[in-house]
Amino acid sequence: MTGARHYDQESDRALLERARDGEAEAFGEFFRRRHQVVLAYLMARVREPDVAGDLLDEVFCAVLITVHERDRELPELPVAWTIGVARNKLFESYRQGRVQAAARQRLALEPVVLHDADLELIDNVARDTDVVARLREELPEEQVHALRARVLDDREYAEIATELQCSESVVRQRVSRGLRTLRQRLGTQP
Amino acid sequence: MSDYSKRLEQRYVDASRRLAGEPAPAARPRRRRRTAAWLIAAALVIGVPTLALATRPWDGPTPPAVPGAGLARVSAASAAAFPVLARPAQARDVLPRSALSILGVQQETTGVNPRLARQVVSGRFGAAYLIPGDGSLCLLVAPAGGPVRSNCTRATKAAADGLLSAGIHEPGGTLVAGVAPAGWPAVTIVTRVGRPVVLPVNPDGGFTAVLSSPPVAVKRAASPR
């Protein structure tokens, strides 16, 4: 974006800190850096680019709101946390039968307009982005594996345990540890 | 090529500024591109709503005049190709508020004028509108409860081929809506999977259906039997 400073050396968390301190372009950089993995996660679940695009907007609006709430601790792993937010938004949307819009309403933002070219782009991003590979850059392997099965693939504990040839409680521990890692570094979720 | 990511990025930068209490920078005048001006029309992006649209919701049958609000009148060629654009405005032609603010952002650069929009088809799904711009035509689909979608192209291309929305996912299938040029009694929708579907065209040139597969193309068809 024109006029945006270079953030190449900044961590995601540093970007969010800068955004919290009033450097709006830093949040833009965070979005630019991480929106593809979130989009790919959402597309894998909803399969429809218009729904995924709509959800993506709601997710980043929710993240932005949290970033500006100074009494909330910022996450140490913002990308994993953002995927957690996406998962929550997805489930809320399933429950209510429509895509959540609470964060956008709070920001007084109109719905996103999606053009045909946008939908094609979303399709392409989803096809070309490996969510697990991105998470692997951030988390220990065993937690990635457990999270992948439980959170990304939404599989049952028993099924995962059979595949991994361990007990269900071990799987639960790994998932729990992975999620705890994400949550503790955040403090809470929006 | 889509500028989806940049539009969203700018959206959040602006929102972040507002949350931080910093006013968003004034919108810079946009340059017209000499080549492929219709592509600009396709970029009906979300941004800071124009003052007129943000402060005055349009609830009358005809939106009020907005100075510099784009195309002043429908071209003879577009009106001939799509007679619905030549009929007097009706209450149903008023665009949903969410679409108004979006279109307002682009009025000065694309010539898209919501005042000249005409509804071409409506139903349980919501409604679709044909909106003329400067050398372009846009089909705007506003599904009930879903995000507004648009598809813009050169007016000459639309007059030759019609305008079709991308498939919109909804329970039971994929919603399509479109508008056919004058003289087309029906359209054939070619879908990604399965046999082509023939749909009748209504008196406004509009058509809509829920299909089992996303649409790929629209063609002229003889009257459906």
Image: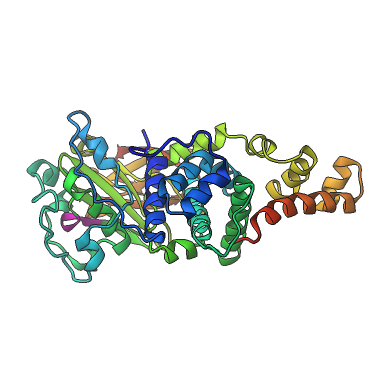
Closer-to-camera residue (A14/B62):
A14
Can the viewer see residue B84? yes
Image position of A6 with respect to A169: above or below? above
Residue A58 vs residue A124, the one in the foreground: A58
Count of numbered circles on the image: 0
Locate residue B158, reporting x and y percent. Answer: 23, 39
Residue B215 colored in magenta in the image: no
Q: Is any part of residue A47 visible from this angle?
A: no
Q: Is residue A117 depicted above or below B208 in this figure?
A: above
- Determine the residue located farthest toward the top in the rendered image: B35
Is A141 on the left-hand or right-hand side of A97? right
Provide residue B183's location: percent of width, then percent of height. 19, 43
- Depicted B219 relative to depicted A86: above or below: above
- Which quadrant holds residue A14? top right
Which image quarter holds the N terminus of chain A?
top left
* Residue drawn at the location 25% of the way across and 38% of the way down: B40
Residue B118 covered by magenta stretch: yes
Question: Nearest the camera: B6 or A163?
Answer: B6
Does residue B28 appear left or right of residue A172 in this picture? left
| Image spot of residue B210 (x, y percent) | 44, 52
Q: Which residues are magenta?
A: B114-119
> Residue A140 at x, y = what percent?
76, 39
Q: Quadrant of the C terminus of chain A?
A: bottom right
Kindly identify the residue that appears in the image at 52 percent across and 56 percent down.
A67
Point 70% across, 56% down: residue: A184
Identity of the residue drawn at 63% across and 39% down? A131
Q: Nearer the viewer, residue A186 or A110?
A: A186
